[in-house]
Amino acid sequence: MTLTVAGVYALVVWMIAGLATRLWWPQLACLAASCYLLIEISNSNALIRIRSRMVTTTFIFLSTMFVSGFASLTGGIVQLCFVTAVLLLFNTYQDNQAAGKVFYAFLCLGLSSLFFVHILYLVPVVWILMATQLQSFSGRTLAASLIGLLTPYWFITLWFIYQQDFSLLASHLSALASITVDYSMVTMEQVLVYAFLLILSVAGIVHFWNNSFEDKIRIRLLYGFFTAFTLLILALLALQPCHFDPLIRLAFVCASPLVAHFLTLTSTRITNIAFFVIMVICITITAVNLWMLS
């Protein structure tokens, strides 16, 4: 019943925040689709070595904390595209000829870059992790990734050619050269969500790598992927808070397996107490953010 309870909890929070009156149904659909794909990632790769829905449950609770993000359809699409890309990339494990899956994975990243162009900064990191963690990097998959990444731009370029106006595309891509470190717009909600996620992520990373000998080599490599991305995105969030909405969603995806591994596979007195403390803090942050939204 864990996942069911989490789903009902999230739906109640969304309703309180104004789901029906503000017509956030597309945003909720993106979150639901992301949850389903996380279930697929967890099940197909056995991220938790016992039967558990905790990866998706953790993702739901973390995502529900960011109440002001409910209104962002762009953030929901970016998150959904990213989860899809991760699912496809994990299916290429030790297969450096999996050009088709790599193409579709990077097609998703290319689509997400239409909404959040700065995600292109993560592409070289994905290539590195494909080589070191997924062991699926080769000349063939590199070519497939480049084609997949550029495909959405090929299609929209046709429209700009028809309009004979490339100013919108130029301004979209020129944002890659804009690096603004501005903390003046950081809200209390963002500070609470980021600090809590940072603490949980560090706890999850330390726990996993202290106990990684109990997991298979494949699982260690996949968690290495999540660890690298979690640390990278948290660092980017600290340096570029202006992109908090899309980046924190990516952090939720990558940190959820690490936190879920810690919550599921520890059963000492201290960690059992920590579980309830984490739940209370998470719900409290959500309640505070709901209050600030109203």
Image (cartoon, rainbow, N blue to C red):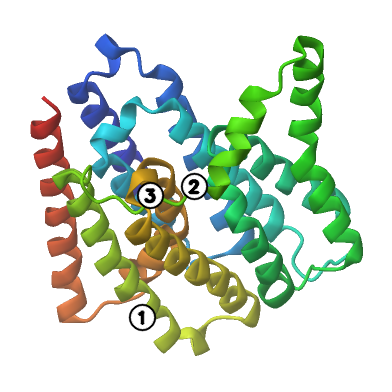
Q: Nearer the viewer, mark 3 or mark 1?
A: 3
Q: Amino acid at mark 3?
A: Ile
Percent across and percent down for residue 159 are: 77, 16
Percent across and percent down for residue 279 are: 18, 56
Would you say 87 lies left or right of 47 here?
right
Would you say 246 lies left or right of 136 here?
left
- Measured Cα–Cα span from mark 2 to mark 1: 37 Å
Quadrant position of residue 23 = top left
Percent across and percent down for residue 249 are: 41, 46
Report the quarter where the N terminus lies.
Answer: top left
Q: What kind of element bears circle 1? A: helix
Residue that carries the numbered disc 2 in the rendered image: 178
Quadrant position of residue 216 = bottom right
Residue that carries the numbered disc 1 in the rendered image: 207
Which of 146/51 is in front? Answer: 146
Residue that carries the numbered disc 3 in the rendered image: 248
Which of 153/79 is in front? Answer: 153
- Residue at image position (73%, 57%) is 91
Q: Earlier in the sequence, mark 2 or mark 1?
A: 2
Q: Amino acid at mark 1?
A: His
Percent across and percent down for residue 8 are: 28, 33
